[in-house]
Image: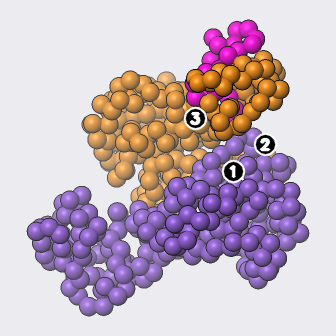
Chain colours: A purple, B orange
Amino acid sequence: MNIILLEAVECQEDPVVLIGRRAEHIVKILKCEKGDWIRAGIINGRMGMAEIIDVRRKYPFQVVVNTHFDTSPPAKNPIDFVLALPRPIMLRRILSQAASLGVGTLHIVNANRVEKSFWESSIIEEGLFREHLLQGLEQAQDTVVPEIVLHRRFKVFIEDFLPCIISRYRYRLFAHPRSSRGLGTFFTAAEGGRVLAAVGPEGGWVDYEIQKFEEHGLHGFSLGPRIMKVDTAVINIHGRLMAEVERLHENL
Amino acid sequence: MNIILLEAVECQEDPVVLIGRRAEHIVKILKCEKGDWIRAGIINGRMGMAEIIDVRRKYPFQVVVNTHFDTSPPAKNPIDFVLALPRPIMLRRILSQAASLGVGTLHIVNANRVEKSFWESSIIEEGLFREHLLQGLEQAQDTVVPEIVLHRRFKVFIEDFLPCIISRYRYRLFAHPRSSRGLGTFFTAAEGGRVLAAVGPEGGWVDYEIQKFEEHGLHGFSLGPRIMKVDTAVINIHGRLMAEVERLHENL
């Protein structure tokens, strides 16, 4: 935890009493005492510092703070992902990593090669995204929770939903190992703008899905001959896109 | 496993009998039968296909194959890393991910903020790198094991070892959150060449280490305000570097 995140409802007035995981972290890992200052912020709100005014060490720990939130969180990157639903352990990791990287929105879609049972996992059924997203924000020192949108039917996503949002994106791409184009070849126009990048399931998109992406104006790109795990691919693609986006931004 | 890897000593003549993890994978996950063909290769050697000529299902499984290795493995990327030794669970993940991405060499170094106990972990003491590297190669369909070099003393690494290899690198960089330069600013000369990128421990490099890097011709770069886990940082930096390297390559 590089920042302690508070719910807006918790910090309507000072002092704020922290309990549970956050209090334990402050006492046991950060080893803070009364008078110390720690980085903190309001979920989806401003961030800054909190002054510890009391540490109650009788279990369960309580840490009492006064908050000083005077800074905006870092900007999100202009990159959103479409992600074929991966297996739950992979999804948890991606949620946390995407939040830490500053991804804007993650559209989680069905695809032909997504195992049906993944949609019945507790993380999906109960929408348990938030704790993993918050872990990523705590790592990155950010407060703004990325948006997660579930699309249980690929056809509905691509035909009905995607056309409503596609105009937000200057760059519309999907990962496709058989494509002959590298990612960099799409960023030659020196034009800034948001990027939408779609990453398939293990085994890739099937021909029908590729055809639908192309019909709706997305372009396939390849990362070369290596097959990556989905989480590695997402971070790798995000890194490549950031290099392109920052270069365009400098040229503008 | 997207490729079955064989030791050179195993496949001096056909047929080859596979046992253990690989045989189980072929029988249980790939559900192969006699007559099927699977992707396979020799560790640090050529790759291609193997024809299954017998499957012995009595436990422990045995799979008998004839090999046809006629392809070179994919080229490694022109990117090597210096990595402050992370905690063992993180190191295992990075080894596998670095191998899957096609990193050339990983120099694992000590640093002020590396916990001493990490050097006493079994993965370091017993040099148990290979199984994690092979997992990455099996994922990526590669056969060539990245080189791992341990440097237990930072001073010896930077003063004695680094000067011997530094001339191999056109781009010499270290991650440093307080740097004012983004990664892309170093790749404006349209000159190709190998990249060496150093990634610090949790909490970053200390001033002495930064000074030593600078004395030896490395330049600090920042990835922005977000603090990443080391594994996320390595993949992210690798992605950004690949974008730069591929763009330079196209311009050459």
Vertical position of residue A74 compared to residue A221: above or below: below
Let me know if marks 2 and 3 both belong to one chain: yes
Residue B146: name its quadrant. top right
Amino acid type, mark 1:
Glu
CA gap between label 2 and label 3 equals: 34 Å
Whether B15 is among the magenta residues is yes
Mark 2 or 1: in front is 1
Chain for disc number 3: B
Please provide the residue range marked out in magenta. Answer: B1-23
Label 1 and label 3: CA atoms lie apart by: 16 Å
Q: Does the magenta stretch include residue B18?
A: yes
How far across and how far down the image is residue A17, in percent? Answer: 22, 80
Query: In the shown orientation, is residue A33 left or right of residue A2?
Result: left
**Of the numbered discs in the image, which one, if any, rests on residue A202?**
1
User: Helix or strand or loop: what does disc 1 sit on?
Assistant: loop
In this view, the residue in front, A154 or B17, is B17
Q: Do the residues labelled 2 and 1 touch (CB within 8 Å)?
A: no
Tags 1 and 3 on a common chain: no
Three-letter amino acid code of the residue under disc 3? Gln
Residue at the location (23% across, 60% down)? A30
Query: Please, is residue B227 above or below residue B166 in the view?
Result: below
Which badge, 2 or 3, is on the more N-terminal residue? Answer: 3
Rendered position, A41 above or below A140: below
The residue sitting at 13% across, 75% down in the picture is: A54
Number of the label disc, if any, that sits on residue B252: 2
Say if residue A167 shows up in the picture.
Answer: no
Looking at the image, do the residues carrying marks 1 and 3 touch, with CB atoms under 8 Å apart?
no
Amino acid carrying mark 2 in the image = Leu
- Residue sitting at x 73%, y 8%: B13
